[in-house]
Amino acid sequence: MFNIVLIHPQIPPNTGTIGRLCVNIGARLHLIKPLGFSIDDKEVKRAGLDYWSKLDLKVWESLEEFLEANPINEHFHLATTKTDKLYFESQYKAGDFLLFGSEVSGIPSDILEANQDKCITIPMTSEGRSLNLALSVGIVAYEALRQNYNTFKEIDQ
């Protein structure tokens, strides 16, 4: 249904939780190295519970390798705090790529600057800097699912 892309994730439980979410919504998870952990870590598997073996997972050696195989186009949505476009103002289609940067540094600034029209954000008060990565993925992914729920139901039957 969708492609969830994590660029250089650093926290194993976040990735495990996102993997579990991907299984439950029929999304493919793309992990772009370097990772801050081994995907064999018990923390990843514990957060993903018994879902990890059911996960449609693709691990990329580098961001360059991923972008060469998947050039950024109208099917990409880049989650960042550096835009005013709200995630629910975007139109999502089955097969779209939802990109999220690492918990430490986000999506590289050169990619954001070159693709400002594809950037989306989750509203927060001025008290916060950002949300947890797994929570952010869940919020955006379920909006994308909501917009494509009929397609999702057909796939799941």
Image: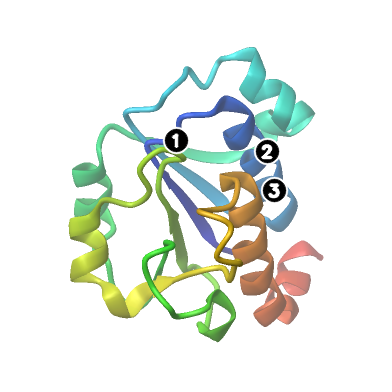
Q: Residue at x 68, y 38 (%)?
A: 17
Q: Do the numbered discs 3 and 2 sit on residues whose CB atoms are within 8 Å?
A: yes
| x, y percent for residue 139 | 66, 62
Rendering quarter of residue 25? bottom right
Name the one closer to the observer, 8 or 66.
8
Mark 3 to mark 1: distance in Å? 16 Å
Give SS at disc 3: helix
**Mark 3, other Cα within 10 Å: few <14 / some 14–19 / many ≥20:** many
**Mark 2, other Cα within 10 Å: few <14 / some 14–19 / many ≥20:** many
Give SS at disc 1: loop
Mark 3 or mark 1: whose residue is earlier in sequence: 1
Rendering quarter of residue 79? bottom left
Q: Amino acid at mark 1?
A: Pro
Q: Amino acid at mark 3?
A: Leu
Looking at the rendered image, the disc whose residue lies closer to the viewer, 3 or 1, is 1
Mark 3 to mark 2: distance in Å? 6 Å
Mark sitting on residue 17: 2
Q: Residue at x 25, y 43 (%)?
A: 63
**The C terminus lies in which quarter of the figure?**
bottom right
Residue that mark 1 sits on: 9
**Mark 1, other Cα within 10 Å: few <14 / some 14–19 / many ≥20:** many
Q: How many marks?
A: 3
Q: In this picture, is 141 found above or below 59?
A: below
Mark sitting on residue 117: none
Residue that mark 3 sits on: 21
Mark 1 or mark 2: whose residue is earlier in sequence: 1
Q: In this picture, is 128 found above or below 50?
A: below
Mark 1 to mark 2: distance in Å? 12 Å
